Amino acid sequence: MNYDILEAFGQIAKEKNLELDYVLQTVEAALVSAVKKKYNVEDNVRVEIDKQEGEIKVFLTKKVVDQVANPGQEMTVAEASEYYEDVEVGQVLDVPMPFEDFGRNAIATAKQILIQRVREAERQKIFEEYKDKVGELASGNVQQIDKGNIIVNLGRAEAIIPGREQIKKEKFRQGDRIRALILDVQDTNRGPQITLSRASTDFLKKLFELEVPEIAEKIIDIKAVAREAGERSKVAVYSNDDRIDAVGACVGVKGVRVQNIVRELNNERIDIIPWSSEPMIFVTKSLAPAKIVNVDVFPAEKKMLVAVADDKLSLAIGKAGQNARLAAKLTGWRINIMSATEYDALKRSAEEEKVDIETITEIGAKMIQKLLQAGFESAQDVLSADRERLLSIEGIGEKTAEKIIAACASAVEKAAAEKPEAEEAPVSVSAANLEFSPDDEEQPRPEDY
């Protein structure tokens, strides 16, 4: 053993980004295993690496006996005297073993164990390094495309971008530079499995943090993101400083900031929307650029009925419902969209079908006055209201409430039965009562509405 070998171990430690002490401990353990295998001994092997002298020292701990029964663990006084003076029976001594005595097989065993342990340590270190980077951006080179999955070389580790985490229609070739979000890191038998994503909303958020300093500095918050990767995204932003325009800061001078993100995302369209704590305003802004004419809010169902100008209906819905679907995901509200003409017709029809509360003979005059004072002008108002609101009226308990609801339901049914059948109206796109939910998934895209 000499300093050249120590230098070689140091080089291994440097290349594998490991501590030199760990490499030396691994060498010691590997040599112990090799000695045990060669001499068929148990726990009486000790290996020391002397950094000062640059030597490996191997010892077998043996007991001095009169007659040897186990050569691997015992020795006679004569044998012990070759190494020590004044030896006596019963002493336990360390017998030095020349490194060369191991033979090629033992050295090969030690080398194999060393390689295996260094590889395991390297894998564990990579796992520990990347598991704390989940949610951060990573850059690398495309190593290969395997069954639709992109294998990325990150330098010290490999990562994979599965098909589901790729941007549609985006193509990469071997050697291309690529940037993605570290989505997940798993410790497997084959080493750390690093999964990247370019399709997640978090990837879009990180790109905004990179391009917009105000977001990185928490002056501007990204409140919500709805994304259909490669097609279109909506980002709701809010400024914590009244002097800074959140949308303008994200767009940048002449749109340079958002255009950098658009190019990174294969020309994905990005709508930047001012966030509002008022749901109706937020939904209205999220449907831009369509012009909103009327909005009816139903808080209990977290639902809105939105009427848009007749010539802006297709714009509000978007291709295959994309604009409205993203607006629903962004706001968290279910959105029903129809044209202004159909909205007016719906309101007229609802008004005509109303049954005045005063015409219901099953409800007494005093109770009708109480209902009118509480804002219940029609039977439909009673049927659509929360029971708690009805019970909050003085003099109305559970039984009385049941009777009032039953009377209103009966009156509405009677009015509907007496109404003459109307001519069937032609059905248009919006007449289908288009509703978009936050849970809606992207649909196959037709040419257009």
Image: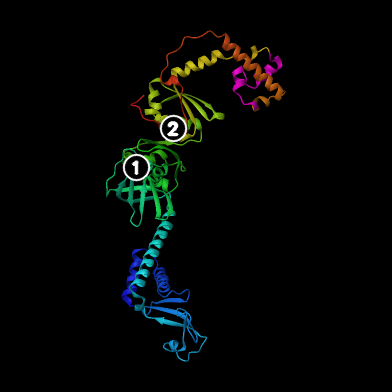
Task: Give the percent coordinates (x, y) of residue 45.
Answer: 45, 76
Q: Upstream in the sequence, badge 2 or badge 1? A: 1
* Residue picked out by circle 2: 327
Nearer-the-camera pick, 387 or 291: 387
Please name the predominant secondary structure of the magenta segment in the image. Answer: helix
Secondary structure of the residue carrying tag 2 is helix
* Residue found at x 37% / y 30%: 444
Q: Within 10 Å of the Cα at label 1, are there few (<14), some (14-19), or many (20+) other Cα atoms?
A: some
Nearer-the-camera pick, 139 or 442: 442
Q: Within 10 Å of the Cα at label 2, are there few (<14), some (14-19), or many (20+) other Cα atoms?
A: many
Range of residues picked out in magenta: 362-387
Q: In the figure, residue 35 lies in which quadrant? A: bottom left
Disc 2 and disc 1 in contact, CB within 8 angstroms: no
Secondary structure of the residue carrying tag 1 is helix
**Is residue 391 in the magenta section?**
no
Nearer-the-camera pick, 332 or 393: 332
| Viewer can see residue 287 | no
Mark number, residue 395: none
| Viewer can see residue 126 | yes
Amino acid marked by disc 1: Ile
Residue farthest bottom in this picture: 86
Residue farthest right in this picture: 395
Vertical position of residue 158 compared to residue 101: above or below: above
Task: Give the percent coordinates (x, y) of residue 117.
Answer: 40, 64
Vertical position of residue 251 compared to residue 62: above or below: above
Q: CA distance from mark 2 to mark 1?
A: 20 Å
**Image check: 92 left or right of 311?**
right
Quarter of the picture containing the C terminus is: top left
* Residue found at x 36% / y 48%: 160
Q: In the figure, residue 247 lies in which quadrant? A: top left
* Residue picked out by circle 1: 261
**Is residue 369 in the magenta section?**
yes
